[in-house]
């Protein structure tokens, strides 16, 4: 009998990385933050909450109390679905603002970013179509790209995705889901009006489509009336996944998010989470639940939103002098971002290295697009700096753009 043997060389090349690891790029925002980490740079690039507004004392007290009173529980493994006390509080907060929700409807995630990865794992096969807004949140594009999805942009306007265009794409592409940040969207800051949300929900119900409604910024409202979640509209109630997060209202370092989803999809996401990290850290969940029991989160968010509103006003007040004639920008009623379009012919990606030399930074708009981008666009985050710092940053930006 002849036995074939594989003979290894003295040194052989390692097997290659998975194709998805090389086909999906990193986050341009993270790359820019690394380049602009110098303390003298006024950085409008990152979507970073203002650290001086964190309730560090209240959060520290919650951790101390949890570790003093229930150390064995806080430092032990937990269930994949999340700590019951935290899920109950989140269910009550969700019910007060929208659809009736039980604790069992909630899955705790390690930041709402993980929720996107879990949904991609649970719903998508390579080649499946996913519909997104244009422009779209960068990390969602990454999550869907890693799943091997065909990501397709839905055309829209200042009010958000166009319902007629959405229906045409659903009929033609047969997508699994439509992803949207309808309130104070990242990157544009726009909010989809109630009537359009109802139209999107009706299409999802009639055409058979999951809607993933991401709401990390919705509580950061400075003015105007709250708009109901898409999840509250009749046509979408059984096919909407609602994502939430403590990152913008408590602290991003907690890495606490959640998803509310119908039972079958939620169970599939729980299985995907078991394979990813077993569960979100127990001590963080219990500390958040304790904070919610002992402190008034809504009052804290109101204070943060008031400060952010002043910072938005400072940015809006300085944009006309900073930007070239013919520029346009959004006026968000909340959230963290202003979206800017420079006059035709400007390329904000090409301009950025020159702008950074003036110790100020923004995020170019191009990476937020699927397909052909609008290269004259850019995103400015207005919450991380004080009004005086914003004024100085815009002065630098104007000087750089005129150079």
Image: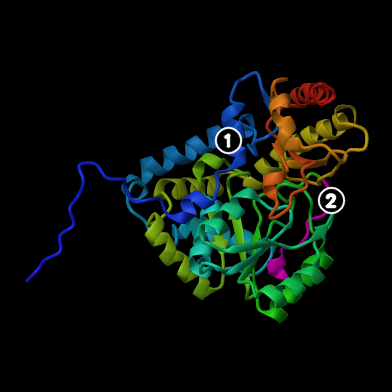
Q: Determine which residue is flagged by label 1.
A: 31
The mark that comes first in sequence, 2 or 1, is 1
Q: How many marks?
A: 2
User: Magenta segment, which residues?
Assistant: 223-235
Q: Is residue 268 magenta?
A: no
Above or below — where is 284 with respect to 82?
above
Front-most of residues 113 and 177: 177
The circle on residue 245 is none
Above or below — where is 46 with respect to 216?
above
Numbered disc in front, either 2 or 1: 1
Residue name at image x 70 percent, y 51 percent: 369
**Left or right of 254, for residue 393:** right
- Residue extending furthest bottom? 206
Front-most of residues 358 and 372: 372
Could you say which quadrant of the image residue 183 lies in?
A: bottom right
SS at mark 2? loop
Residue 177: x and y in percent read 63, 68
Residue name at image x 74 percent, y 42 percent: 337
Residue name at image x 65 percent, y 39 percent: 47
Above or below — where is 199 with respect to 77?
below
Residue name at image x 62 percent, y 29 percent: 52
Q: CA distance from mark 2 to mark 1?
A: 35 Å
Check whether the beta carbons of the residues at disc 2 and disc 1 lie within 8 A of each other: no
Q: Is residue 224 magenta?
A: yes
Query: What is the crowding at mark 2: few (fewer than 14 residues within 10 Å), some, or many (at least 20)?
Result: few
Q: Is residue 78 visible?
A: yes
Residue 306: x and y in percent read 76, 38
**Left or right of 128, for residue 204:** right
**In the rendered image, which quarter contains the C terminus?**
top right
């Amino acid at each position: 009998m002849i036995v074939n043997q594989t003979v290894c060389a003295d040194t052989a090349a390692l097997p290659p990385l998975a194709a998805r690891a090389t086909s999906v790029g990193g986050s341009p925002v993270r790359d820019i933050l690394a380049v602009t980490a110098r303390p003298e740079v006024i950085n409008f690039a990152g979507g970073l909450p203002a650290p001086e507004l964190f309730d560090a004392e209240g959060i520290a007290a919650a951790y101390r109390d949890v570790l003093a009173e229930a150390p064995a529980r806080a430092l032990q493994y937990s269930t994949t679905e999340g700590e019951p006390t935290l899920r109950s509080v989140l269910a009550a907060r969700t019910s007060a603002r929208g659809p009736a929700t039980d604790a069992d409807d909630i899955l705790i995630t390690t930041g709402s970013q993980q929720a996107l990865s879990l949904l991609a794992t649970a719903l998508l096969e390579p080649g499946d179509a996913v519909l997104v807004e244009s422009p779209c949140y960068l990390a969602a594009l990454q999550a869907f790209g890693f799943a091997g999805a065909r990501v397709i942009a839905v055309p829209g306007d200042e009010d958000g995705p166009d319902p007629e265009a959405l229906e045409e794409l659903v009929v033609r592409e047969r997508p699994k889901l439509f992803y949207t940040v309808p309130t104070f969207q990242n990157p544009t800051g726009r909010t989809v009006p109630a009537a359009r949300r109802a139209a999107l929900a009706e299409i999802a119900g009639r055409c058979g489509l999951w809607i993933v409604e991401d709401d990390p910024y919705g509580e950061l409202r400075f003015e105007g009336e709250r708009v109901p979640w898409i999840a509250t509209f009749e046509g979408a109630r059984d096919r909407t996944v609602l994502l939430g997060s403590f990152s913008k209202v408590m602290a991003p370092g907690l890495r606490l998010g959640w998803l509310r989803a119908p039972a079958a999809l939620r169970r599939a996401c729980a299985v995907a989470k078991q394979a990813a990290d077993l569960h979100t850290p127990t001590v963080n969940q219990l500390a958040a639940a304790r904070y919610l029991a002992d402190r008034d989160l809504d009052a804290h968010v109101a204070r943060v939103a008031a400060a952010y509103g002043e910072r938005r006003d400072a940015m809006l007040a300085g944009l006309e002098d900073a930007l070239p004639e013919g520029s346009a920008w959004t006026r968000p009623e909340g959230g963290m971002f202003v979206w800017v379009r420079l006059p035709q012919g400007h390329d904000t990606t090409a301009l950025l290295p020159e702008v950074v030399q003036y110790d100020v930074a923004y995020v170019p708009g191009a990476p937020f697009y699927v397909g052909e981008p609008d290269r004259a666009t850019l995103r400015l985050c207005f919450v991380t700096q004080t009004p005086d710092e914003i004024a100085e940053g815009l002065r630098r930006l104007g000087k750089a753009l005129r150079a």
